[in-house]
């Protein structure tokens, strides 16, 4: 087990380092001068040089890379060009929005998917099963941003139950929660389509096993068999997909925040692209990539908790 | 003859509709998709404008048809580019083995850390948003997917007797790869390509919706949706049609891919 942990941790650190190299390389080494991009093609050479000096672009590339990584480790990502404040400040102001959306989206995804998936498996080859499979097939094909627009048209434009977008801040919790309902549903419905399908097939596999038959023969209630005996043993593939989906949900917030005009990190990325604010984009892309890599790493570790057999094998 | 799987049939029908529309749009659309006619704006569906017109009086149906072509080309180029690079890497890894195989696969793992959206965001920040960047971003995420699949499939073929016979006869690794391995792993590659085609359509729509893909006046389902979103109170129907087109295309290619997998790999079909 120690060896397993060691290998995975080394792999995790290696991946993080490489990701940082890729992000840095794309943003800094690819042909294309950030100073020129910021100032536009008509800018004078003097102006471009001055800006390059100010951005530190005239320093050797390796030095810039190590400087960037070292500072990033302490939460410093440099100065935002367009806002004129440290990038770290911009991020911490908007983090709560994105975290709230990602966490609520993930929780709702798991609730919907487990309920539908286990329900479908329990009704294998019956009407409910077909219904869930249809929902899942459709959910995979529907873009989250289109679903968002449909939800807004129905619940905000036609029924006027919920706000169509925007976020008034956390001062009034009820209004804040109300403006997060549609984004959360849009985020979760699409994600739960994939997870429901995995849950269903994983549960079906477990239900074929002997001990489930024994449990049935012992007269346990259906509900108890499904949630106490089938689900825990069906969890390994489910957790893998949940880990991958956590990454999808986090990057999904980028899209959803832009559909609903929510002031989170996803919105910040797009404002920064529009403003050609490279340090901010670089920091945010790195942050999102780190979350994705970390999610995969945590999934690896979770296997040990879910499937104790792995501990012995390693 | 064995009964064809239902997903293959539905998938083929949907894909035929989408591809047919895309090809048809090359030679005919009811109106010029880019032609603005403000006096005809927000026209209801009629015999002249089957699905009505948008805020600039452009025919919605013609725009949808032209956008289908755009979407197909983007998906095709992205999957071909990413798929062939990825497959080559996978074949190389499998043929050479050892530390090269490890290295290629580690690099492929890192590719998984970047969703297409993040990559497109980086490219857009450096070069400015464009459809070409979107294509590159989608192609990029396909590389590790195909590298993994082709390596895993190729490794299986390398253990077969006929490959062993070739090796015994002194045929070089690259010749074997080209003559024996590649033809034998084409089935899983084509299945994956069909599924990735669906993913690419979805990704292009999302990137164009966010302004990182097709730029005006290029027709695109994603961009039509982002324009329609600002008109939700005025003309909600404009936000319906492009979405339906995306769903039909993605569903079609997804089902076709699933169906192809079911007939090429019957073991998986029984599991589901």
Image: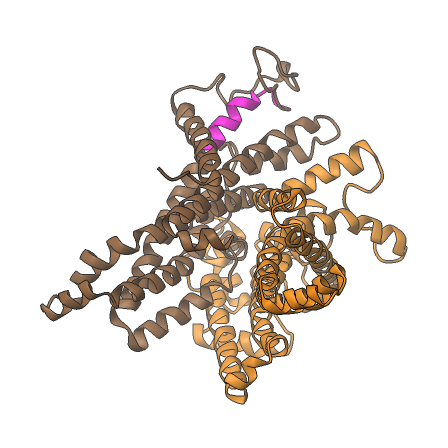
Chain colours: A orange, B brown
Q: Nearer the viewer, residue B28 or B257?
A: B257
Q: Does B46 appear above or below B254?
A: above
How many circles with numbers are drawn on the protein?
A: 0
Q: Is residue B250 left or right of residue A249?
A: left
In the displayed orientation, state which residue is furthest to the front: A217
Q: Quadrant of the N terminus of chain B?
A: top left
Per the rendered image, the range of residues in magenta is B55-68
User: Residue shown at 66%/65% (left/top)?
Assistant: A230
In the displayed orientation, state which residue is furthest to the bottom: A2
In the displayed orientation, state which residue is furthest to the top: B47
Q: Nearer the viewer, residue B210 or A222?
A: A222
- Residue A112 percent location from the top left of the image: 71, 53
- Residue B65 percent location from the top left of the image: 49, 26
Dividing the picture into quarters, in which one does residue B223 lie?
Answer: top right
**Residue A10 visible in this rendered orientation of the protein:** yes
Dividing the picture into quarters, in which one does residue A279 lie?
Answer: bottom right
User: Residue shown at 64%/49% (left/top)?
Assistant: A190
Q: Does B23 appear above or below B142?
A: above
User: Residue shown at 53%/52% (left/top)?
Assistant: A39
Majority secondary structure in the magenta region = helix
- Residue A42 percent location from the top left of the image: 48, 47
Dividing the picture into quarters, in which one does residue A196 lie?
Answer: bottom right
Residue A225 on the magenta segment: no
Q: Is residue A2 left or right of residue B8?
A: right
Q: Does A157 appear above or below B200?
A: above
Q: Nearer the viewer, residue A111 or B215?
A: A111
**Residue A85 visible in this rendered orientation of the protein:** no
Q: Nearer the viewer, residue B78 or A60?
A: B78
- Residue A225 percent location from the top left of the image: 71, 64
């Amino acid at each position: 087990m120690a060896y397993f942990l060691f290998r995975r941790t080394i792999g995790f650190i290696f991946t993080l380092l490489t990701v940082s190299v890729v992000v840095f390389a794309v943003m800094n080494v690819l042909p294309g001068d950030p100073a020129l991009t910021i100032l536009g093609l008509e800018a004078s050479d003097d102006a471009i040089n001055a800006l390059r000096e100010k951005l530190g672009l005239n320093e050797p590339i390796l030095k810039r890379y190590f400087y960037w990584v070292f500072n990033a480790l302490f939460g410093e990502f440099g100065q935002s060009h367009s806002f004129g404040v440290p990038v770290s400040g911009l991020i911490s102001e908007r983090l709560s929005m994105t975290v709230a959306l990602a966490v609520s989206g993930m929780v709702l995804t798991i609730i919907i998917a487990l309920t539908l998936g286990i329900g479908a498996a329990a009704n294998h080859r019956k009407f409910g099963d077909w219904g869930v499979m249809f929902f899942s097939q459709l959910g995979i094909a529907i873009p989250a941003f289109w679903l968002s627009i449909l939800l807004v048209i129905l619940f905000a434009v036609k029924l006027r139950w919920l706000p169509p977008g925007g976020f008034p801040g956390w001062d009034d919790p009820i209004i804040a929660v109300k403006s997060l309902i549609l984004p959360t549903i849009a985020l979760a419905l699409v994600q739960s389509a994939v997870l429901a399908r995995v849950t269903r097939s994983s549960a079906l596999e477990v239900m074929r096993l002997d001990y489930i038959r024994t449990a049935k023969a012992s007269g346990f209630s259906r509900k108890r068999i499904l949630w106490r005996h089938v689900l825990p043993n069906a969890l390994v593939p489910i957790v893998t997909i949940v880990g991958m989906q956590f990454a999808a949900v986090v990057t999904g917030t980028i899209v959803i925040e832009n559909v609903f005009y929510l002031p989170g990190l996803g919105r910040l990325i797009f404002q920064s692209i529009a403003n050609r604010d490279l340090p901010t984009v670089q920091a945010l892309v790195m942050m999102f990539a780190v979350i994705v890599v970390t999610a995969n790493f945590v999934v690896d570790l979770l296997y040990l908790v879910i499937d104790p057999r792995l501990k012995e094998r390693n | 003859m064995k009964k064809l799987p239902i997903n293959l049939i539905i998938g083929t029908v949907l894909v035929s509709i989408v591809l047919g529309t895309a090809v048809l749009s090359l030679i005919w659309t009811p109106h010029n998709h880019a032609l603005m006619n403000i006096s005809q704006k927000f026209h209801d569906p009629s015999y002249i404008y089957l699905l009505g017109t948008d805020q600039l009086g452009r025919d919605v149906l013609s725009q949808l048809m032209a956008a289908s072509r755009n979407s197909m080309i983007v998906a095709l180029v992205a999957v071909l580019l990413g798929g062939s690079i990825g497959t080559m890497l996978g074949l190389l890894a499998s043929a050479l083995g050892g530390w090269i195989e490890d290295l290629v696969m580690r690099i492929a793992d890192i590719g998984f850390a970047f969703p297409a959206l993040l990559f497109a965001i980086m490219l857009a920040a450096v070069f400015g948003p464009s459809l070409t960047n979107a294509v590159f971003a989608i192609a990029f995420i396909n590389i590790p997917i195909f590298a993994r699949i082709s390596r895993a499939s190729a490794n299986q073929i390398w253990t077969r007797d006929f490959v062993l016979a070739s090796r015994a006869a002194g045929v070089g690794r690259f010749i074997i790869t080209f003559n024996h391995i590649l033809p034998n792993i084409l089935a899983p590659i084509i299945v994956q390509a069909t599924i990735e085609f669906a993913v690419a359509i979805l990704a292009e729509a999302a990137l164009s919706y966010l302004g990182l893909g097709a730029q005006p006046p290029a027709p695109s389902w994603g961009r039509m949706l982002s324009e329609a979103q600002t008109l939700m109170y005025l003309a909600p129907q404009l936000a319906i049609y492009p979405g339906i087109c995306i769903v039909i295309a993605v569903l079609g290619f997804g089902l076709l891919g699933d169906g192809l997998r079911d007939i090429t790999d019957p073991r998986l079909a029984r599991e589901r």
